Image: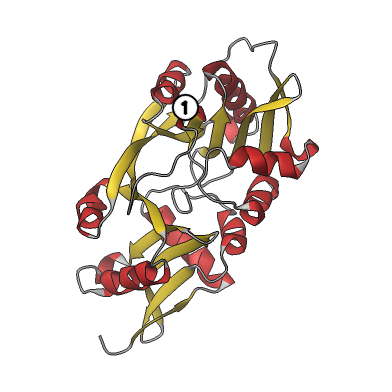
């Protein structure tokens, strides 16, 4: 592979990666790259052939013992030549010794199993315009920015296996996004973020104590999406998520598998109605 080199992705490269993900039909958020950059600035790798970008992957470190792989893409005209394996090996080397997760598309899951990953659950993307309906009067949704950030970060830790405060701060506050929290008797009982994308606006994360709370958040967030169309990647490990989203009139359109190199971390799967990001977990 003369002329092939792997290095860190620049800020300009991150826009290229977003475009590649868009071409794969993943519908990434328009501004996701700005939050990704603060999660782990060295965690995005780009393979270049004679200086021309041909393959990419993310290998983001969280805390001291967890990592997540995403953005694994090879330019379509150069697939099958080993460039993907090279960037994949660089990603796994960067996360060596850590429990590592990923969200794998169907056609790659067999390859991930060969690399030691095992399925923990399936994410089903539901898309559409939610049906209007009555809200639970005991649930109050507020702008998440109005709550102390330490409370939001502590709540997020129930659903994610490592601290990610810098990422969460950017993810919830970037321009064009809306973050809503559900509050009951002064307690946070739900959190959701909607962000603009090339197609349906994506909601993620979507956390909720009950289906009623999740429904209130989905309907509230859809009000900030063009045409009200949203997409949520719902984990089947929480069966209530798919039931709720289908009941709101959203339809399944895309599937990935959450996979780990070891036992799945203990998180509040009963309250997980939508994963944050297929690229960063």
Examine the rendered structure and indicate whether residue 13 appears above or below residue 257.
below
Q: Quadrant of residue 201?
A: top right
Residue 74 falls left or right of residue 134? left
Q: Residue furthest bottom?
A: 2
Q: Where, by quadrant of the figure, is residue 192 drawn?
A: top right
How does the figure colour the protein chain or chains?
secondary structure
Q: Which residue is mark 1?
A: 270
Image coords of residue 221 (percent x, y): 62, 30
Viewed as shown, does residue 61 lie left or right of 5?
right
Residue, x 53% and y 46% (percent of image)? 197
Depth check, front residue: 268 or 233: 268
Query: Which quarter shows the N terminus?
Result: bottom left
Locate residue 116, reporting x and y percent.
25, 57
Q: Residue at x 32, y 66 (%)?
A: 74
Marks counted in the figure total 1
| Residue 202 percent coordinates (x, y) | 52, 39
Q: Position of residue 121 (x, y in %)?
A: 33, 37
Where on the picture, by quarter, is residue 40?
A: bottom right
Residue at 26%, 46% in the rendered image? 106
Q: Secondary structure at mark 1?
A: helix
Which is more toward the observer, 108 or 25? 108
Q: Is residue 159 above or below residue 111?
A: above
149 to 92, vertically: above or below: above
Q: Residue at x 55, y 33 (%)?
A: 206
Q: Is residue 278 visible?
A: yes
Crowding at dot 1, Cα within 10 Å, few <14 / some 14-19 / many 20+, comes out as some
Q: Answer yes or no: is residue 55 visible.
A: no
């Amino acid at each position: 592979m003369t002329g092939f080199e792997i290095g860190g992705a620049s800020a300009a490269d991150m826009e290229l990666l977003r475009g590649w993900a868009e071409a794969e039909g993943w519908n990434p958020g328009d501004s996701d790259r700005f939050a990704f950059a603060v999660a782990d600035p060295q965690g995005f790798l780009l393979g270049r052939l004679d200086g021309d970008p041909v393959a990419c992957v993310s290998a983001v470190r969280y805390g001291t013992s967890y990592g997540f792989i995403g953005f694994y893409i090879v330019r379509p005209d150069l697939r099958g030549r080993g460039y993907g394996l090279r960037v994949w090996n660089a990603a796994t080397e960067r996360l060596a010794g850590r429990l590592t997760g990923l969200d794998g598309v169907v056609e790659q899951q067999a390859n991930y199993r060969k690399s030691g990953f095992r399925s923990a659950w399936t994410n089903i993307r539901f898309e559409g315009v939610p049906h209007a309906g009555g809200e639970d009067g005991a649930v109050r949704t507020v702008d998440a920015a109005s709550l102390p950030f330490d409370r939001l970060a502590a709540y997020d830790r129930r659903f994610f296996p490592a601290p990610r405060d810098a990422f969460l701060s950017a993810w919830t506050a970037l321009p064009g996004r809306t973050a809503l929290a559900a509050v009951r008797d002064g307690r946070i009982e739900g959190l959701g973020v909607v962000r603009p994308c090339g197609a349906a606006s994506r909601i993620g994360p979507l956390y909720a104590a009950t289906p009623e709370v999740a429904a209130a958040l989905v309907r509230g967030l859809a009000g900030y999406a063009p045409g009200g169309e949203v997409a949520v990647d719902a984990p089947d490990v929480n069966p209530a998520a798919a039931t709720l989203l289908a009941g709101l009139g959203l339809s399944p359109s895309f599937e990935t598998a959450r996979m780990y190199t070891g036992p799945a971390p203990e998180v509040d799967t009963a309250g997980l109605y939508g994963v944050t990001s297929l690229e960063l977990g």
